Amino acid sequence: MATSLSTPRLRLRPWRESDFAPFAALNADPAVMEHFPSIPTRGESDAMAARIMARIEETGWGLWAVEVRGGEPFIGFTGLGVPAFEAHFTPCTEIGWRLARGAWGKGYATEAARAALAFGFGDLGLDEIVSFTAATNRRSMAVMERLGMRHDGEFDHPRVAEGSPVRRHVLYRLRGSGNP
């Protein structure tokens, strides 16, 4: 059964078909996608949303759709995933987020991520959760630091072409309570 999480201002929930259009809109925003190699087409965005939806239906958790209680029905996603590439820190569970520009600067990413971390460490019993982003993405690094994550080096993302300005990534880690 798919899990939903709640915070005082937000609801992290399974995806709906109605989320695909606003997801495509946020993916088409150059400011949102500044630290990614490219802006996905509508078809690519819909395919990503369908994969995320299927993952949550299959496992009960993943990159949940985020809605503002009593407000916007979809502002982006936040949640947990398993990276589908090999690196020195995989296999692992990653926390990630992508919010529409109108949702920036309100603390939503940190609030939603805290709920996802609590689920990962509590319900899933994970010992560690990682996060990574392009080395140019100061906003996401600031969220990682607010979450108590610690910088643990850099790496070249294997799925980003050589020479791309966003190939170099930073890695952050957080251990669960009571884990050194």
Image: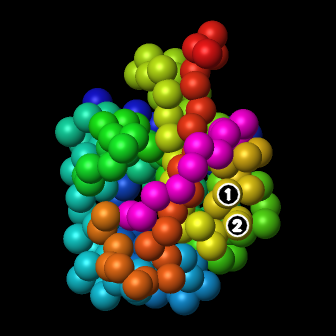
For label 2, the residue is 138
Is residue 165 in sight in this rendering? Answer: yes
Q: CA distance from mark 2 to mark 1?
A: 5 Å
Q: How is the image coloured?
A: rainbow
Q: Quadrant of residue 67?
A: bottom right
Element type at mark 2: helix
**Nearer to us in this view, 11 or 89:** 89
Q: Write the start and end of the magenta stretch as one range.
A: 147-157
* Viewer-proximal residue among 49 and 173: 173
Q: Position of residue 16 (x, y in %)?
A: 35, 59
Quadrant of the drawing holding the C terminus: top right
Q: Position of residue 175 (x, y in %)?
A: 58, 25
Residue type beneath disc 1:
Met
Determine whether label 2 and label 1 are within 8 Å by CB: yes
- Name which residue lies at 76% across and 45% down: 146
Main SS, magenta region, reads strand
Residue 141 numbered mark, or none: 1
* Of the pair 121 and 174, the residue shown nearer to us: 174
Q: Is residue 173 magenta?
A: no
Residue at 67% x, 57% y: name it.
141
Q: Position of residue 110 (x, y in %)?
A: 69, 48
Would you say 92 lies left or right of 68 here?
left
Q: Quadrant of the N terminus?
A: top left
Q: Is residue 164 above or below residue 157?
A: below
Disc 2 marks a residue whose amino acid type is Arg
